[in-house]
């Protein structure tokens, strides 16, 4: 496999990880692969509820069987089938340090996206129906915070989620508050040293 241009996106829930993917896809010629969507499809294939706990279990199973960077490898394999059409691949979201390490091993860049917790929670609740996640994202602010704390910290099993360790490996950190998608896109393009283009109004994952 030849050298590819790869960007891995990580960050807190609702910070705007998918927005990064859409911006790079629509304005800079990248293929956007949602590794979270890969897990959702696997849950549906197994006739399991599409819930964060189920997705965490599947991702841990895959990492134990196929290596900690398996989700990155699946995204790259998808890109390799169509790479002549794209400038590179952007994938979201990285939730295990082995995934960040895999992106770096492929010569890529890891971005960490964050925002105020209340802003992120309100953003998720506002968009949960239109994004087809009414059941998955229907929770109180306290449940949201508890779930995130569980995903941020290592359980002792290297195959499970450890977003704090991913954050430590990030090459770039950007904030996505409520200043609007135009400013967020400007900050992203500045951080990645990309030239801008026509704006598109999207909100975050």
Image: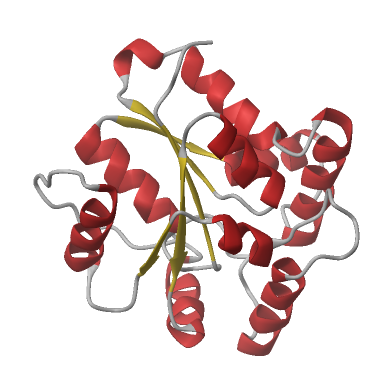
Left or right: residue 27 versus residue 21 is left
The foreground one among 128 and 1 is 1
How is colour applied across the structure in the image? Answer: secondary structure
Left or right: residue 189 versus residue 156 is left
- Residue 168 spot, x, y in % from top left: 59, 63
- Residue 17 spot, x, y in % from top left: 45, 56
Q: Which quadrant is home to the N terminus?
A: top right
Q: Is residue 25 above or below residue 152?
A: above
- Residue 58 spot, x, y in % from top left: 81, 44
- At x 81%, y 54%, the residue is 160
- Identify the image quadrant of residue 161: bottom right
Left or right: residue 46 versus residue 80 is right
Q: Is residue 202 above or below residue 26?
A: below
Q: Is residue 88 above or below residue 123?
A: above
- Identify the image quadrant of residue 29: top left
- At x 77%, y 72%, the residue is 150
The foreground one among 173 and 141 is 173
The foreground one among 24 and 4 is 4
- At x 72%, y 67%, the residue is 151
- Residue 178 spot, x, y in % from top left: 29, 79
Going by the picture, which residue comes out furthest to the left? 198
- At x 47%, y 11%, the residue is 2
Left or right: residue 149 versus residue 80 is right
What number of labels is visible? 0
């Amino acid at each position: 496999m030849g050298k590819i241009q790869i960007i891995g996106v990580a960050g807190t829930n609702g910070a705007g990880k998918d927005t990064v993917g859409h911006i790079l896809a629509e304005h800079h010629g990248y293929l956007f692969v949602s590794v979270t969507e890969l897990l959702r499809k696997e849950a549906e294939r197994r006739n399991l509820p599409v819930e964060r706990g189920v997705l965490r279990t599947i991702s841990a199973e895959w990492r134990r069987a196929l290596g900690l960077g398996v989700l990155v490898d699946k995204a790259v394999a998808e890109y390799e089938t169509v790479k002549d059409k794209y400038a590179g691949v952007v994938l979201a979201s990285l939730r295990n340090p082995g995934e960040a390490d895999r992106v770096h091993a492929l010569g890529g860049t890891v971005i960490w996206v964050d925002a105020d917790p209340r802003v992120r929670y309100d953003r998720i609740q506002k968009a949960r129906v239109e994004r087809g996640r009414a059941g998955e994202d229907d929770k109180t602010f306290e449940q949201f915070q508890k779930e995130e704390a569980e995903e941020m910290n290592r359980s002792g099993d290297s195959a499970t989620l450890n977003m704090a360790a991913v954050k430590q490996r990030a090459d770039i950190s950007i904030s996505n508050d409520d200043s609007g998608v135009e400013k967020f896109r400007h900050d992203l393009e500045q951080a990645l040293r990309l030239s801008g283009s026509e704006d598109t109004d999207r909100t975050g994952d």
